[in-house]
Image (spheres, helix red, strand yellow):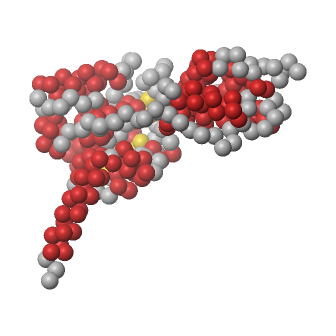
Amino acid sequence: MQKRGKLFIDYYENWIKMYKEGAIRNVTLKKYYLALSWLKRLAPILKTSDISRTVYQQLLNDYAEYHEKQTTMDFHHQLKGSILDAVDEGLIANDPTRKTIIKGRKPKEKKIKYLNQFQVQTLLSNLNLANEMNADWLILVIAKTGMRFSEALGLTPKDFDYANQTISINKTWDYKGEGGFQETKNRSSMRKIQIDWRTVNQFSGLLKDMDINKPIFVEGKTYNSTINHSLNRHCKRLKLPQISIHGLRHTHASLLLFSGVSIASVARRLGHASMTTTQKTYLHIIHELENKDIDQIMRLLSGLN
């Protein structure tokens, strides 16, 4: 009886510790604890045994008042596993997550910031690529490959295959936490990125005397904001639009799409789990390309007599 009267926030916290800690990546685990913090705010005295379809729906509705629909969906998925376990344990009579309706705030229009080909060429031509590793080398490799910031920080000399002109992405660096190598975002993120011969020559000379197992861009605590500041300083000096280091990833993808590279190839190069992610992220660019395609189709058809 005492177990049935347990607060849901306590049940959920114990469930996270029992089933999630040590089984999922820290970045994912933090999302479960963030969901717990919202539970404590929205339903601090809700008992596990009192969760019905109506009560659960109201909880999601309350959460949706502050979040977009996709974020509310994520919150639902983070809670659902624990609730179904509570049903199996007999703490809840029936599955309250059945036929759930997901609501949420209207998404803010997100315009991706990226540089065009001339602008990125101007940036790269003015980087201070010294004879030892610095922030500008990091800017270069992300602009040339489109890899994520954490993936770039996880690079070691042995990830460079000069003969085949590739860089292997097989780990990341935990720059938000205590540091150290960790797994990639997902299985699709494990990939080899083809690089040009000039980049091969630049890094083969730069890394030849480095420890093959040491991260090449990490020296003590590394902050995303530090690299962004360095990049913004360059953009301001060169009178370019100011973008973030993640904006260089968008820049890389945008240049590939505008040059005619297929969405499938761009998705693989970026390490996206599916082409759908790429299509959603770069929808505005795809629309521009579709308009160009229509012009080409019309020119072709008008020439057929």
- Which residue is at 81% across, 20% downward? 5
Q: Nearer the viewer, residue 55 or 127?
A: 55
Residue beneath the point at 29% across and 24% down: 227
Residue 272 % position (x, y): 43, 46
Q: Is residue 238 left or right of residue 80?
A: left
Q: Which image quadrant for residue 25?
A: top right
Relative height, residue 272 to residue 20 (above, below):
below
Can see residue 152?
no
Q: Is residue 116 visible?
A: yes
Q: In the shown orientation, is residue 2 left or right of residue 162?
A: right
Residue in the picture at 79% in, 26% down: 49
**In the image: residue 106, left or right of residue 209:** right
Quadrant containing the N terminus in the rendered view: top right
Which of the two residues, 302 or 185, is positioned nearer the viewer here? 302
In the image, 28: left or right of 97? Answer: left
Q: Position of residue 228 (x, y in %)?
A: 28, 25
Quarter of the rendering occupied by the C terminus: bottom left
Picture quarter containing residue 121?
top left
Residue 73, given in percent of the width and then of the height, sits at 55, 37
Numbered label tally: 0
Between residue 17 and residue 208, name the one nearer to us. Answer: 17
Q: Position of residue 243 (x, y in %)?
A: 24, 31
